[in-house]
């Protein structure tokens, strides 16, 4: 009965078993392939992620290096600024000390300034006084200088009232020059290169003699006059020696005729007069022109003021001047 229960696999059963095993193996193979694919893909993804992470890491590392460089520079700058702050603090302390000293000195200087202001005021007062006195002195000295021109102006007026201002040729009889001296043109008194007084010039010289006597009759005028010089001048024609002789002879002849025409002038005031010849050495015109040469040929009257009179005025000023401090 037992043998009846034993099962025997038939060929048909065997054929049914192997296809099922093959299916299982195929399935396993597919699963394994799938897993391999998944692992491969995952590895690819991981590799990509690793590259990205590596790039990010490199970028981060570079950023850190940059930040580190910046930090080093910042630290150095901070050190420099700290040194600068220390230096500024030292300078500030020095300035504060200087300010304290300056403030202390300022008080002393203010006192000095006040003292200097007082001294300046005193000096201003002294200067004002001296300026006024100097102006007075200048006026007195100028009055002496003007006196020469005033004397000759009176002589000129006296002659013009008697003889007129011009001769028949239209020449001015008496001229007062820029130097305040009085002069007459050579042609009015002399012929060319001659020292003899012309007849037509004698009337002019007589009037000069009368005018000088009237002027010297004033004691105030005589008090300041040292001398009246009759000077002969020529142009540049001829040698200097010849012209010196000619100019001296002319001035001497003019003075001699003035004294001869008015003996009382020589008697009273002859000591005031002198004659001199200057050749062509003191021209008042250009010898290169006829007009200039004519101006240079002249008889000139010059008044010398007494030095002691000027000195007297200066001494009076010095005596009245305030003493120097």
Image (cartoon, grey):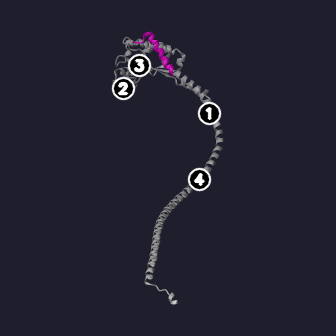
Residue 309: tell me if it is visible: no
Residue 89 in view (yes/no): yes
**Does dot 3 land on a helix, a strand or a loop?**
strand
Contact between marks 3 and 2 (CB within 8 A): the answer is no
**Which numbered marker is on residue 241?**
2
- Distance, label 2 to label 1, CA atoms, is 62 Å
Crowding at label 1, few (<14), some or many (≥20) Cα neighbours within 10 Å? few
Query: Most prominent secondary structure in the magenta stretch?
Result: helix
Front tag of 2 and 4: 4
Q: Position of residue 273 (x, y in %)?
A: 47, 19
Find disc 4 in the rendering and name its residue.
Answer: 85
Specify start and end residues of the magenta stretch as a single range: 145-166
Judge depth for marks 4 and 3 and give the one in front: 4
Q: Is residue 176 left or right of residue 86?
A: left
Q: Residues within 10 Å of mark 4 (few under 14, many from 20)?
A: few
Q: CA distance from mark 3 to mark 2?
A: 18 Å
Can you identify the residue that label 1 sits on?
120
Determine if the magenta segment contains residue 159.
yes
Query: Which residue is rendered at x = 44% and y = 84% of the image?
Result: 10
Q: Residues within 10 Å of mark 2 (few under 14, many from 20)?
A: few
Q: Nearer the viewer, residue 160 or 258?
A: 160
Does residue 95 lie above or below 216 as drawn?
below
Q: Secondary structure at mark 4?
A: helix
């Amino acid at each position: 009965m037992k043998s009846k229960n034993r099962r025997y696999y038939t060929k048909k059963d065997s054929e049914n078993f192997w296809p099922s095993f093959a299916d299982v193996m195929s399935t396993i193979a597919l699963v394994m392939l799938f897993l391999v694919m998944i692992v491969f893909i995952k590895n690819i993804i991981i590799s990509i992620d690793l590259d990205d992470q590596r790039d990010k890491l490199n970028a981060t590392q570079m950023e850190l290096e940059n930040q580190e460089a910046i930090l080093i520079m910042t630290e150095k700058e901070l050190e420099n600024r700290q040194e600068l702050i220390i230096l500024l603090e030292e300078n500030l302390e020095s300035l504060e000390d200087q300010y304290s000293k300056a403030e202390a000195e300022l008080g002393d200087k203010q006192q000095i300034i006040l003292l200097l202001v007082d001294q300046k005021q005193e000096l201003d007062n002294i200067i004002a006084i001296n300026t006024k006195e100097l102006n007075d002195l200048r006026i007195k000295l100028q009055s002496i200088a003007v006196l020469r021109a005033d004397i000759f102006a009176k002589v000129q007026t006296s002659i013009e009232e008697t003889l007129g201002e011009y001769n028949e040729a239209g020449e001015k009889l008496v001229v007062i020059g820029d130097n305040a001296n009085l002069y007459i043109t050579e042609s009015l008194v002399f012929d060319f290169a001659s020292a003899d007084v012309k007849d037509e010039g004698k009337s002019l010289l007589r009037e000069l003699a009368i005018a000088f006597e009237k002027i010297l009759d004033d004691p105030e005028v005589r008090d300041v006059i040292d001398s009246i010089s009759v000077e002969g001048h020529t142009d540049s024609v001829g040698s200097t020696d010849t012209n010196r002789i000619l100019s001296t002879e002319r001035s001497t002849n003019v003075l001699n005729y003035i004294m001869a025409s008015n003996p009382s002038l020589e008697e009273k005031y002859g000591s005031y007069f002198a004659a001199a010849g200057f050749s062509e050495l003191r021209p008042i015109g250009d010898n290169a022109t006829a007009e200039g040469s004519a101006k240079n040929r002249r008889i000139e009257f010059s008044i010398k003021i007494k030095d002691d009179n000027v000195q007297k005025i200066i001494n009076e000023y010095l005596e009245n001047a305030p003493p120097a401090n």
